[in-house]
Image (cartoon, grey):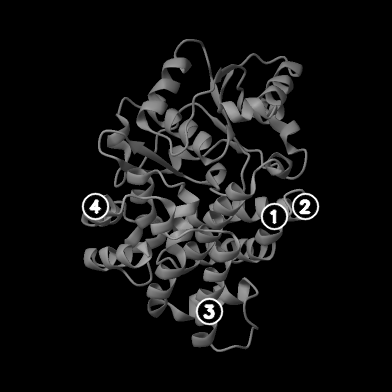
Amino acid sequence: MGGGALAELPDALARTGCKHPLIITDRVMDELGYLSRVKGLLEQAGLASGIFLDTVPEPTVACVEAGLSVYRTDQFDGLVALGGGSAIDTAKAMSARLATDIPMHALKVPHIITHKGPPVFAIPTTAGTGSEVTRVTVITDGTTDEKMLCMGPGLMPAAAIVDYELTLTVPPRTTADTGIDSLTHAIEAYVSRKANAFSDQQALGAMRLIAANIRTAFHNPDNHAAREAMMAGATLAGMAFSNASVALVHGMSRPIGAFFHVPHGLSNAMLLPAITRWSIPGAPARYAECARAMGVVSADLEDEAACTKLVDELMALNEELCVPAMSEYGLDEERYHALLETMAEQAAASGSPANNPRPPSQADMVALYREVWA
């Protein structure tokens, strides 16, 4: 972890005995020169590698299967995932599929993935998903437009190379979306019904780092200190939610991404203020502590006022980071409202809403989808 950590990749591979990895990435990583840096490090260490360049945002079953076809063309023995959460999620899904003959749609929750496939070496280039340290992957079923949540210890990467210098080229829009995604991970992990003393410390630490630095990283992308803090916050938040799970925001966000292809972090941001306001009655003391960790209020402010300030801050953050309302993003209004019940059903099926401190009914989720449209 830290600036220059990418150089540790050959040692990480050596510790697992991996000698011929397939690099899972996309064409942007190639254009930015990051792929050639990784290839160069492997070549210097005497390691051959292959490349799968066709990962896509919001990874699909078809993308995973395409990657598997490439993997099976040679004697590969590991997966180096270079990119944002999409590349890492794709590699994790490929590893899970290589460990078993079970098709992707049968690996979604409530199935728990325990079999270990080829080792995954995760190199995140955004400060967002935390996928490099989680036992979770999300893959879209293109036939049903369902974002399938897959979980289990078999999905844990073998190693994470968390080098903030790889985020210096990330544009402001992506910085904002991935940053709010990681903030949502931290908040939801802290208020989750599965929260515990271990995850609490990671979540609180992540909130402190992200809240203090997200605006600077957005407005001044060359600020190394802010980029490093955001990267550390994202990884901590990933560890937090991997141990405590996410909740209603993520549950309702996934169907929006699947049906309307809204970037995951952006749909989280669109939902976060309204769902936080609705959820506060289920855990006011916990949400108040989020406000304190984020530096929104003083330590001695009483809980009710702190919760109000938290929602105000989330709304102000969205405004400063130019997060649009659903109605402003270009979604088809008629289709959106026609899919409310289906999206609520898919959200509930993921299991995430059940972790919320105020568990929602399907009617509650439909009402919240209507509220965030405007």
Residue 7 in which image quadrant? top right
Q: Nearer the viewer, mark 2 or mark 3?
A: 2
Q: Is residue 340 visible?
A: yes
Q: Nearer the viewer, mark 4 or mark 3?
A: 4
Query: Residue at 52% of width from left, 85% of height from top?
Result: 303
Mark 1 or 3, nearer chain start: 1
Q: How many angstroms separate mark 1 from mark 4 (CA)?
A: 36 Å
Query: Residue at 35% of width from left, 38% of height from top?
Result: 140
Q: Is residue 247 visible?
A: no
Asked if the residues shown at circle 1 and circle 2 are in contact, with their CB atoms under 8 angstroms apart, the answer is: yes
Amino acid carrying label 2: it is Asn
Amino acid carrying label 4: it is Leu
Towards the viewer: 202 or 32: 32
Query: Residue at 72% of width from left, 16% of height from top?
Result: 43
* Residue 270 percent across, percent down from the top left: 45, 60
Circle 4 — which element?
Answer: loop
Vertical comparison of 9 with 274: above or below: above
Residue highlighted by disc 2: 223
Relative placement, left or right, of 227 versus 16 is right
Residue highlighted by disc 3: 288
* Residue 154 percent across, percent down from the top left: 44, 38
Mark 2 or 4, nearer chain start: 2
Query: Residue at 57% of width from left, 75% of height from top?
Result: 291
Q: How many angstroms separate mark 4 from mark 3 (CA)?
A: 34 Å
Mark 2 or 3, nearer chain start: 2
* Residue 77 percent across, percent down from the top left: 53, 19
Amino acid carrying label 3: it is Ala
Mark 1 or 4, nearer chain start: 1
Residue highlighted by disc 4: 339
Amino acid carrying label 1: it is Ala
Mark 1 or 2, nearer chain start: 1
Q: Which mark is residue 217?
A: 1
